[in-house]
Image: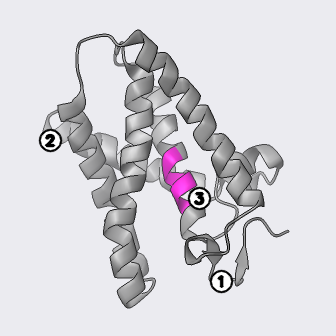
Amino acid sequence: MNLKNLIKSSVIIFALCSLCHFGYSTFPSFISSIFFPVNESIFEHLKMLFTAEVIFSLGSFLFIKDNNKYIRMLLRGYLSIFILLLLYLPIYYLFGEIMIVTFLILFITIFATEYILGYLSTKKHHPYLNIASVFFIIITYILFSYLTYHPIKENLFLDKESNKYGIHN
C-alpha cells in the first residue's frame, strides 16, 4: 500500500472511530451496545476501534477484490486492539488521560495496523481460514457483549467519569 492510500485509509478509520464513539448514546439499545461503547472505559473504546475496523473492512469489500477478506477484517480488528493497548496503557497508567495524546495514539495505532496489514496480505486463497475468521468475529462480539453487561471489576473496565463498570442506565 502506498503512503497516500495508507494515510487515506487511516483517516477514514479514525473518522469511523469518532462516529462509533457516539453510536450507543445516539441509538441506545441492546444491539448498539454490542458494537459501540456504552461508557468511557478503556474496554468499551476497544469495542469502538474493533467496530470501526470492521465497518472499514466491509466498505473496502466494495472496492478491493480480496479472497481473504474476513481474515483481513479479523486481523485488522485484533491487531489494532493489540497495538492500542501496547501503546496506550503505559502512558495512561503513568500520566492519566490526556485527550490529545489519546487521539494521537489512536491514529498511530490505526496507521500502524494498516501498514502491517500491507505486509501480511497474501494472494493465496485460504477458504477455511477465511470462514473461521467470520466465526472469530462473531465470537469477539459475543465476548464484547457479555463483558459490557458483566464486566470484570478491573481498571480496564472502569468508567472513571461515573466510577462504574459496564452498562449503567
Q: Which residue is mark 3?
A: 21
51 vs 25, left or right, is left
Callout 3: helix, strand or loop? helix
Viewer can see residue 47: yes
Residue 92 percent location from the top left of the image: 41, 80
Q: Quadrant of residue 150?
A: bottom right
Viewer can see residue 106: no
Q: Quadrant of residue 41?
A: bottom right
Residue furthest to the right: 169
Residue furthest to the left: 2
Answer with mark 2 or mark 1, whichever residue precedes in sequence. 2
Callout 2: helix, strand or loop? helix
Q: Quadrant of the C terminus?
A: bottom right
Inspect the image, locate mark 3, and give the three-letter code of the amino acid beneath it.
His
Answer with mark 3 or mark 2, whichever residue precedes in sequence. 2
Q: Which residue is mark 1?
A: 161
145 vs 54, left or right, is right
How far apart are labels 3 and 2 at the CA level?
Answer: 27 Å
Viewer-proximal residue among 101 and 46: 46
Marks 2 and 1 close (CB-CB < 8 Å): no
- Structure colour scheme: one colour
Q: Which residue is mark 2?
A: 3
